Amino acid sequence: MAPPTHHDPDAHRPAHDAPAAYRRAFDAAQPDPERSVVRVELAARECDFSPAGGRFVRAWGYNGRVPGPPIEARVGDVLEVAFTNHLPEATNIHWHGLRVPAAMDGTETVQTPVAPGESFIYRFRLPDAGTFWYHPHHHETVQIERGLHGALIVRGADEPVTDRERILVLDDLRLDKKGQIAPFGGLVEGHDGREGDVRLVNGDVEPVLTVAAGQVERWRVINASSARYIRLSIGGVPFRILGTDGGLIESPITVTEALLAAADRLDLAVGPFTEGQELAVEALPYSRRTIRTRKTERFATVRVGPAQPSRASIPDRLRTIPPLAPVTAAPTRTVTLGVKTSLRRGVDFVINKERHHHDQPVKSGALQVWDVVNTTLMDHPFHLHGFFFQVLSVNGEPPAWRSWEDVVNVPPRATVRIAWLPDDRVGSWMYHCHILEHHASGMMAHFDVVA
Ligand SMILES: [Cu+2]
């Protein structure tokens, strides 16, 4: 998107009462006076797309595309999205991972869903660089699955230099015998969450990604699946993790695989390769203790073409992430992910034993240390709206490196301790499991940030 510019005085909103660590992160994001307003028009409507290059699948897309158009901007820009709903049902847009004001979070708590034929303007400043995404927060099991989701990329001033950048939105679709999106529901789907056998990269089935030999690419990977976990491998060769949900990590980490829970993002440095190499971009088996299990499955193929000169430069130090709390910090709250049997629905996914739990408010500037306790026998991707957190420990063990996250996987019977700081963005927020069927079942909670 070409960012047209005009001066916007009210976009500058200091976080005056946020404690030091968070304020530093926020100050670093203050826009310069030359910042831009990025204006985007999004319309949700029924559309056809052909993931297998043949048969058309009836879908719901933003601007007639699945996934929706990527929105690209710079830190400090103001994003203004004029949204129109041409769907046969109400919808809204949640800006996943963005530190927006509560009123712009796009949930039903803060906004009446946009009725068919109606419009709404979302407008907020982009304080952080990173790989984010947008999707409805209404009837998600159907709306996101049918194709309503897109990437939102915010670039910072000091990004590592790579030769090429790709956005890879990974998704899966469950099609019926007629090749159309299968009807929603059923016991297995309610328990496991919906997974499909058609695996998509940017709406294509197993595309070939041609990479020039000798070059290093930045891949911004988004797991837009309803429920699927992707244990990502690139032909088994090493690649570097540069960033996670909340932007760059402190130093690149070299791995041969990385797990993306549902709604997770990872920024990777991939390559260099040698000409003629062919590598499978695939999901290795990962058991999240579901009824249905999966083998290794391919998402795409990397084919390495003739060499091109490289100007890639990835420093050993990407940025500093000040720790929000010591690993030993005592929890201020326990969030318990659980299941309950239900005569009517079979099983309910709950938080603190309650469907659609109402949790206690938190105070602006008061450090939060939460134990997210999974009492169930399956994994759940925990998502906090509007704020990044740091993982302090998983079952008492500190993680190998520090990062800002808005999604963390909570393994079965595990306790994940997170720390986060509510700033001055008072209002209604929520957290929930990002397996869409679990969220819909009730594994979510509302809470307020109060002054
Ligand atoms: Cu869940």
Image (cartoon, rainbow, N blue to C red):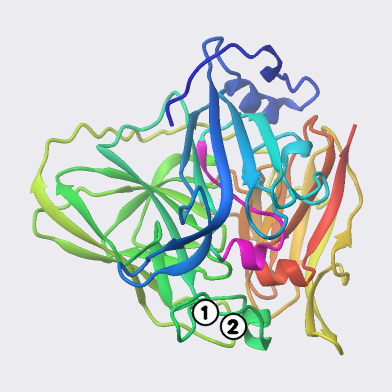
Residue 179 placement, left or right of 410:
left
The amino acid beneath tag 1 is Ser
The amino acid beneath tag 2 is Thr
Q: What stretch is highlighted in magenta?
A: 130-145
Q: Tell me the quadrant of the picture where the C terminus can be found.
A: top right
Q: Tell me the quadrant of the picture where the N terminus can be found.
A: top left
Where 201 sits versus 313, above or below? below
- Total numbered circles: 2
Where 437 sits versus 90, above or below? below
Q: Is mark 2 on a helix, strand or loop?
A: loop
Badge 1: how crowded within 10 Å, few (<14), some, or many (20+)? some
The picture places residue 371, in percent across and down from the top left corner, at 76, 58
Q: Residue at x 14, y 44 (%)?
A: 214
Q: Quadrant of residue 304?
A: bottom left
Q: Can residue 126 be seen in the rendering of this structure? A: no
Residue 376 placement, left or right of 290:
right
* Residue, disc 1: 287
Instruction: Say whether residue 60 is magenta.
Output: no
**Closest to the observer: 303 or 366?**
303
**Closest to the observer: 376 or 167?**
167
The picture places residue 49, in percent across and down from the top left corner, at 42, 62
Where 375 sits versus 331, above or below? below
Q: Quadrant of residue 357?
A: bottom right
Q: Can residue 402 be seen in the rendering of this structure? A: yes
Q: Which residue is drawn at 67% across and 30% down?
A: 123
Callout 2–callout 1 Cβ contact below 8 Å: yes
Residue 168 - label: none
Residue 29 placement, left or right of 233:
right
* Residue, disc 2: 290
Q: Quadrant of ligand 1?
A: bottom right
Badge 2: how crowded within 10 Å, few (<14), some, or many (20+)? some
